[in-house]
Amino acid sequence: MKTKLKVYRAIHNLTQEDLAREIGVTRQTIIAIEKGKYNPSLELAFKIARHFEATIEDIFVYDQSLQSIEGKGVG
């Protein structure tokens, strides 16, 4: 999954620490989401989207090409 979280933070002039504090997670969680190392739970994705008055789809983009690569050879 790709994310536009860093862009939304910049638009709203928020640091990783600011956003983490406002939505109730650690800064490390925000870092991991932005680096694509962690996919947030649905609940966390909704919290982030609501914070920015956006939809989940505005902030998080499901990359089907990654799914097709991961799915090859499975079966």
Image (cartoon, rainbow, N blue to C red):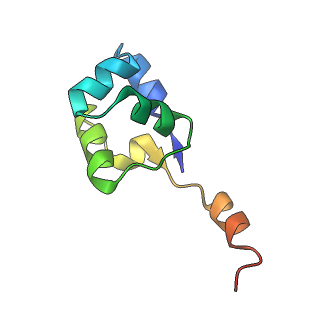
Q: On screen, 72 above or below 52? A: below
Up-down relation of residue 9 to residue 50 (above or below)? above
Q: Residue furthest top?
A: 13
Whole-percent x, y for residue 71 in the image: 68, 72
Residue 16: image quadrant is top left
Q: Position of residue 36 (x, y in %)?
A: 56, 42
- Relative to 50, residue 14 above or below: above
- Residue 68 rendering spot, x and y as whole percentages: 68, 68
Residue at x 30%, y 18% (from the top left corner): 18
Question: On the picture, is 48 further left or further right than 40?
Answer: left
From the viewer's perspective, tell me whether residue 75 is left or right of residue 6: right
Residue pictured at 49% horizontal, 37% vertical: 32
Residue at 55% across / 43% down in the picture?
37
In x, y percent, where is residue 13? Answer: 36, 13
| Residue, far bottom | 75
Query: Which image quarter holds the C terminus?
Result: bottom right
Q: Quadrant of residue 14?
A: top left
- The residue located at (73%, 64%) in the rendering is 69
Residue at the farthest right position: 73
**Total numbered labels:** 0
